[in-house]
Image (cartoon, rainbow, N blue to C red):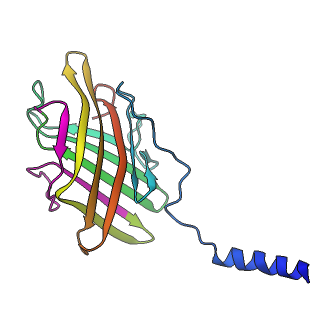
């Protein structure tokens, strides 16, 4: 009888255990300020780190991590700064964008505001797009919904390092009552070696 109960338990467990697309073996990189080209955060407790297995640029060794800056960013950081964290594994796709409208203040706190899904917003924002199991969701930042903290922003001849942390609450653009929490965010970027 005990043998039958054990076998039945295994059958029930195998039927009720589902594969969660959010499971990951990755862990967050340490918080550093050396230009390590690392980034990551937790989205509702699930690890997001750069990993773009479909990325076609063979010259880049930093798959899933993109940096862009406005044309007037050099030399006084007087334009936008954007970091993209992408994780595409199989049919699951995460895309996170951090945007600071102007980094001329240097190190310090940059409050997050309303994103409205604009391509070039006039405020600091964080947004996340998730596609999984055929479903697409876009999450946007709202007024005073979080912070990007710049701990290092060195820009000069032969150096371009940006390090910091971030956290925020984002709402589903199509269903605003649905929110996600971004916690333990960190990045450490060397703009000279990261493929722009």
Quadrant into which the C terminus falls: top left
In this rendering, would 166 be left or right of 108?
right
Based on the displayed image, in which of its 4 quarters is residue 138 positioned? Answer: bottom left
> Residue 110 location, x and y as percent?
17, 42
Whether 185 is among the magenta residues is no
Q: Is residue 11 above or below residue 130?
A: below
Q: Nearer the viewer, residue 136 or 178?
A: 178
> Residue 95 location, x and y as percent?
33, 54
Residue at x 91% of width, y 84% of height: 1
Residue at x 12% of width, y 27% of height: 74
Q: Is residue 97 above or below residue 142?
A: above
- Residues in magenta? 104-130
Q: Is residue 34 above or below residue 109?
A: above
Q: Nearer the viewer, residue 147 or 156?
A: 147
Based on the displayed image, in which of its 4 quarters is residue 38 positioned? Answer: top left
In this rendering, would 182 be left or right of 122?
right
Whether 122 is among the magenta residues is yes
Q: Nearer the viewer, residue 142 or 50?
A: 142
Q: Is residue 7 above or below residue 101?
A: below
């Amino acid at each position: 009888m005990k043998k039958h109960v054990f076998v039945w338990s295994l059958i029930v467990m195998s039927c009720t255990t589902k594969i969660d697309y959010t499971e990951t073996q990755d862990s967050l990189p340490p918080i550093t300020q050396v230009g390590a080209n690392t980034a990551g955060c937790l989205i509702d407790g699930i690890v997001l780190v750069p990993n773009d297995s479909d990325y076609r640029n063979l010259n880049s060794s930093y798959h899933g991590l993109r940096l862009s800056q406005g044309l007037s960013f050099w030399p006084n950081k007087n334009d936008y700064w954007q970091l993209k964290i992408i994780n595409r594994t199989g049919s699951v796709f995460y895309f996170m964008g951090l945007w600071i409208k102007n980094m001329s203040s240097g190190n310090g706190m940059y409050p997050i505001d309303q994103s409205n899904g604009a391509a070039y917003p006039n405020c600091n924002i964080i947004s996340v797009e998730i596609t999984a199991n055929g479903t697409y969701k876009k999450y946007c930042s709202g007024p005073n919904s979080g912070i990007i903290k710049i701990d290092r922003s060195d820009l000069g001849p032969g150096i371009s390092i940006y390090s910091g942390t971030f956290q925020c609450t984002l709402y589903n653009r199509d269903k605003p009552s649905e929110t996600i929490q971004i916690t333990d965010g960190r990045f450490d970027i060397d703009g000279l070696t990261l493929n722009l």
